[in-house]
Each structure stands twice: as C-alpha cells, then as structure tokens.
Amino acid sequence: MRALTSPDEESSITFDFSAALSAYKVDIQGEIPNGFHMVDYLIETEKIMLLLEVKNLNVSKATEQSRKVFYEKLKSGKFTYDMVYKYKDTLLYQMACDNKIEKPIYYYVILEENEIPVNSRLAITKKIYSLLPWHMEKIVEIKNPLIENFAIISLSDWNHLFPQFKAIVVNT
C-alpha cells in the first residue's frame, strides 16, 4: 500500500504516503502476531525508514473512558514502555520476516492531546529516548544503527517535517 487516503480508524487522521517508496499500516487488529506490539505505520523513503505511531485524543470519538485510560498509562509510565515495545517489536518482526532495514531508522510518535503541558511532553520524550537502543553500531557485530532519530511531535510538526506526507484530521 502506498497512498493511504482513508482515515486511520483510531486517530481520524488521513496520511498521503504517495511520495513514499512504500508505506504500510502494520498495526492491524487480527494480523499482529501474538505477543507483539507494533507501531501504526512503516514508511520507506529514499533516505530513511520511518516508524510512526499515532495517538489522537482530540477526536470526537475519544470517550471520557479512553482519555482516562490514556492518562493512567501516562501517570504509571505504561505509555512510555508501550512506545518502546512498539518500536522494538516492529523491528524484531521485520527482522523475523527477513526484511532487512539498511537505512537510518527514524521513530516518531504523533501525540495530539491539547491537555498535556509542554514540560510533560518533554519528560515523556526524554524517558522514551533513554530506553531506545542508541549507538548500538559501536558493538562490532551490529552493522547498522537501530535508531537515528526519535521525537514526540504534533500533527502540525509532522506536516512541517514531512510535507511530502501531508496529514489531516477528518471526522472529528
């Protein structure tokens, strides 16, 4: 799948990945191997492999209960570990499928939630960053870096960083 023109069911965000070499929705219920937690999208460009997770609590279908669960995950640290596991499991699954990733790997989490203060976003970002496998290429047996870039960003940030993959919110 290259261009994703229908909105992501969870986030109500539509992405245009037509400029990508390839783009896949990998977190599809019923298709994820047991025990794996996958990022939402895997996007390949000429220069990078991009892993993308999308969380949009600003959509109208985000119930009070789903918001409560999200904030409980933030408070307990589960959100942090979920984001790390999604990254690692996605890479492990790609390797198990013999899909070699030889390009620099970028991992972005789009987090659309107006109620999270900037300092909290920064703290979450720092915690996830500290748990990702940076500088693994220093180990002789590892030939390629496992990650070169990570950030938690807004949808607006995404559109600024990746204008070739424009994203818009629909049906909120």
Image: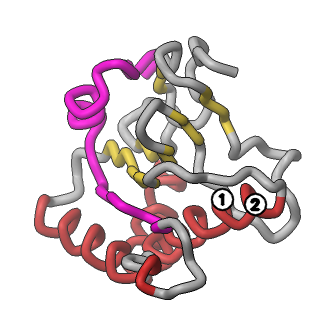
Q: Which residues are magenta?
A: 145-172
- Distance in Å between CA atoms under marks 1 and 2: 5 Å
**Above or below 57: residue 142:** below
In this rendering, position of residue 113 left or right of residue 52? left
Q: Secondary structure at mark 1?
A: helix
Residue 73 is covered by the magenta coloring = no
The residue that mark 2 highlights is: 93
In this rendering, position of residue 167 left or right of residue 124? right
Residue 147 lies, in percent from the top left, at 43, 64
The residue that mark 1 highlights is: 90
Report the residue at 86% width, 46% height from top. Answer: 31
Q: What amino acid is at disc 2? A: Tyr
Residue 148 is covered by the magenta coloring = yes
Residue 154 lies, in percent from the top left, at 26, 41
In this rendering, position of residue 25 left or right of residue 96? left
Residue 60 lies, in percent from the top left, at 44, 30
Q: Say which mark, if any, is on residue 50.
A: none
Report the residue at 69% width, 63% height from top. Answer: 37
Report the residue at 54% width, 35% height from top. Answer: 44
Report the residue at 33% width, 73% height from top. Answer: 129
Q: Secondary structure at mark 2?
A: helix
Label 1 neighbour load within 10 Å: few <14, some 14-19, many 20+: many
Q: Are discs 1 and 2 less than 8 Å apart at CB?
A: yes
Q: What amino acid is at disc 1? A: Thr
